[in-house]
Amino acid sequence: MYRFLLSRQWVFLTLLGLVMIPAMAELGFWQLHRHDHRVANNKIIAASLRTAPAPVESVTGPGATVPRQDLYRTVTATGRFDTAHEVVARQRTDADGNRIGYHVITPLTLANGRTVLVNRGWIAPGDDLTAFPEIPGPPAGEVTVTGRLRPDETSKATGIRNKHGLPARQIQLISGAEAAKQQVPGELLGGYLELVGTTPGAKGPQPELIPEPDHSGIGPHLAYAVQWWLFAAMVPVGWVVLVRRRRAEILAERAGQRGDGGDPPHRPHNGAALAV
């Protein structure tokens, strides 16, 4: 009855199912790991935003890597904006995520000669994407900047491809390595600041500040994990359903064969036939 399971088609189907079950289960655990990472990140961000601002050099230093526990840590830095070495990061969206433009990256030179990069916010692109856009000037003279500390961007972490041959003073990734290519003077502190505010404040229009990161949502990863595990559970169920369906087809075929080659169906005799 079940010898069909030894056919090439059914052996392949069974092996495919045996491969799919652990693969789908592993995909479920991968999504669960991403969920746990998102939850942990949310806790880190919430704690960082609640913490009182700290001097930037107490958290990072020249060439340092920003620790994960200091992600979005609020810090302060006092110095002068260096607009001569200002650059823009390309293909960045505004706060609503609807328009693509630039992030304005302005070095802040500290009193000790060191430099920290400050992301002053978003501006719309001009008509000529190969030309350096017009940027509202930052406050002149000595200012105290308050910002959220971010690690240097990498292609691996952000998914942004670092292109070469860009127009002058335009970059893809916000990082000390890219700033060094722009010949930004002074020792560069690791990471950069997302501007929250300056003292004294700027006069006139300024780039659109980057909003505080969302740290309340958990994303769809947990739902995806459950989905993959349900798919894994459905594979053996589907295999059993297909086997039972094939078994029923074989039984029907055998019944049909017996009906075609057996005795003719019985017909009762009527009275007239007996009389004859």
Image (tube, rainbow, N blue to C red):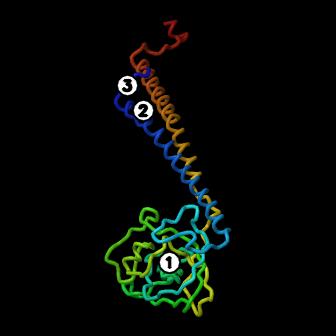
* x 56%, y 55%: residue: 37
Percent position of residue 261, x then y = 39, 17
Number of the label disc, if any, that sits on residue 220: none
Q: Counting other residues with Cα less than 10 Å from the Cα at mark 1, is it few (<14), some (14-19), or many (20 or more)? A: many
Q: Who's the residue at 58% across and 56% down the image?
A: 220
C-alpha gap between disc 2 and disc 1 = 60 Å
Instruction: Pinpoint residue 59: horizontal percent, then vertical percent.
Output: 56, 69
Q: Amino acid at mark 2?
A: Thr
Q: Comparing marks 1 and 3, which lies closer to the viewer?
A: 1
Q: Position of residue 115 (x, y in %)?
A: 48, 79
Q: Amino acid at mark 1?
A: Val
User: Which disc is residue 116 wearing?
Assistant: 1
Q: Nearer the viewer, residue 49 or 209?
A: 49
Tag 2 near tag 1, CB within 8 Å: no
Q: Which mark is residue 6?
A: 3
Please tell me in which quadrant of the rendered image residue 156 appears. bottom left
Element marked by disc 2: helix
